[in-house]
Amino acid sequence: MQSSTFRFYHLKISAKRLPGRQLRLDPLAVVFVGGAGQWNEIGRTEKRLNEWNPSFAKSITLPGDNDNQRRAQVRVDFYNKEMTESRFLGTCEVNFYALIHAKGTSVELELNTPEPVKGSPRVFLTAQEGYNQPGADSSSLVNLSMQLMQTNYYGVSMRIYYEISRAGNGTWVPVHKSENIQIDEQGWGQFPANKISMQDLTMDEESCGLLFNLYRYRRLGSKKLLGCFQTSILELSRKSVGEFVQFTPNHKEGLLAADVQVLHTQKTGSTYDVSLKLVNVQWNATLLTEATVV
């Protein structure tokens, strides 16, 4: 293998005999990478194919090293989208070496649950190797347009911006930051459209995990996290107009709820056109008006 070739692994996840059937909630798997108590989330599943013996539809991209000290942790929860409630089911851990040297076959792990359960729940992990030449997709462009919702205006000066990070080497690496926008009296804002090359995002493939953090700008350059969502360019390109991407609000900073809605997606040649809008936003008016923002 030439040194210029970038190696990565797609981690596929399935499970059997998950506990908590009486909850009638959807199972959700979240993947972390790290070790020695330091864990960084690198991706999470999306659509579930079966409630109790799920084969999670989305694969997670792992860094392409075989460091025997680096470990992958999978956390499994039940998650109720409508009630935005979750219940922790358990975790399992494995090192990269074991996954990689399984050569595409499943590694079976016991799900360590917080309480004893019947049925011996299991998680199955499969790492499939892939290669990519750096710069192979550098000609691809992502025309990203993001609008702020129509929302209530509380008479405070509010500047908001978002930052994009990509999954890489077991952590999130910041790769793009938008300009600040000022919320006007009608409670509406438009982030400037961005043309970002795949090379600028230092992404090896369209399915690379992306983290969007929405920040509120504070005086002297400080910032407060309002919320975040995770996706990929490939995932966005497959969504239909009107579909949503799950957004996680930060209640401590006054944002109670919000959704990210897809307004437009299209791929023409090597160019992706993606337009998103933050909608259904609910603020904590007390927290919002008590804070002084410059």
Image (cartoon, rainbow, N blue to C red):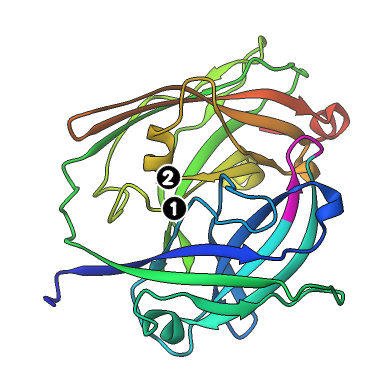
- Image quadrant containing the C terminus: top right
Asked whether the viewer can see residue 195, the reply is yes
Q: Which residue is drawn at 45% across and 57% down?
A: 59
Residue 108 lies in the magenta-colored region: no
In this view, the residue farthest toward the top is 186
Secondary element at image label 2: loop
- Number of marks drawn: 2
Secondary element at image label 1: loop
Circle 1/circle 2 CB separation < 8 Å:
yes
**Badge number at residue 147:** none
What residue is disc 1 on?
209
- Say which of 36 and 73 sits in front: 73
Query: Alpha-carbon distance for marks 1 and 2?
Result: 5 Å
Give the x, y percent position of residue 83: 82, 38
Which amino acid type is marked by label 1?
Gly
Q: Residue at x 57, y 47 (%)?
A: 49
Q: Give the range drawn in magenta.
A: 78-83
What residue is disc 2 on?
232
Q: Which residue is drawn at 24% across and 36% down?
A: 141
Q: Which residue is drawn at 62% across and 50% down?
A: 50
Decide: is 215 above or below 36.
above
Q: In this view, does 279 lie to the left or right of 196?
A: right
- Say which of 74 and 233 sits in front: 74
Give the x, y percent position of residue 150: 64, 15
Give the x, y percent position of residue 124: 55, 71
- Counting residues from the start of the chain, the first of labels 1 and 2 encountered is 1
Circle 1 crowding by C-alpha within 10 Å: few under 14, some 14–19, many from 20:
many
Q: In this view, does 203 lie to the left or right of 15?
A: left
Asked whether the viewer can see residue 292, the reply is no
- Image quadrant containing the N terminus: bottom left
